[in-house]
Image (cartoon, grey):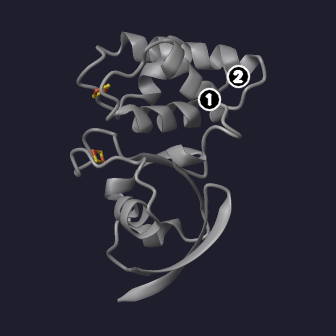
Amino acid sequence: MARILQLTLNGRARTDAVADNLLLLDYLRELVGLTGTKTGCDGGECGACTVLVDDLPRLSCLTLAATVEGRRVDTIESLGKDGHLSAVQRGFHEKLGSQCGYCTPGYIMASAGLLRRNARPTEAEIREALGSNICRCTGYVKIIEAVQHAAELCAEGLTP
Ligand code: FES
Ligand code: FES
């Protein structure tokens, strides 16, 4: 069965015909063409597919597209404006929070969601917010530093 899906994707209203069993990850990457959201484990273990639904992180590989009807969905492509990086993007860039980069979109979206909800997170809160994400390269220390730096940039007026 198919249905009409209406949502706000990266700040713009969209209407698409989608199959009832279409995953949000496949909707974003294959139907819309937003390939910044990554397919990792495809089973809810790695966090590479993390997007924000109404500012809350969601594993798009475990989410049916139909369930975001009427919701606001943000992907990595929504961050940064007019050629300027967002606070979290700058944090990862300036603190070397990314190596191969495959996990990075998921980490950045989970971090952006955290900073939208909590502008001054403690290290424990950052670790908890990123607990569903796995990185095989960085050893995690640089990622935590990146989010702490992003929070400082937000305090200076940048958006997460
Ligand atoms: S691809 Fe979704 S959690 Fe790994
Ligand atoms: S930077 Fe390579 S998996 Fe995280």
Is the CB atom of the residue marked by disc 1 within 8 angstroms of ligand 2's nearest atom?
no
**Residue type, mark 1 in image:** Leu
Q: Residues within 10 Å of mark 2 (few under 14, many from 20)?
A: some
Which residue: 34% across, 72% down?
22
Query: Element type at marker 2?
Result: helix
State the image quarter where residue 21 is shown: bottom left
Of mark 1 and mark 2, the one earlier in the sequence is 1
Which residue: 47% across, 48% down?
51
Residue 144: x percent and y percent?
A: 45, 15
Q: Quadrant of the C terminus?
A: top right
Labelled pair 1, 2 in contact (Cβ < 8 Å)? yes
Give the residue number, with chain letter if any, for mark 2.
154
11 up-or-down from 135: above or below: below
Q: Residues within 10 Å of mark 1 (few under 14, many from 20)?
A: many
**Residue type, mark 2 in image:** Cys
Which residue: 55% across, 19% down?
91
**Extreme residue toward the bottom, this view:** 1
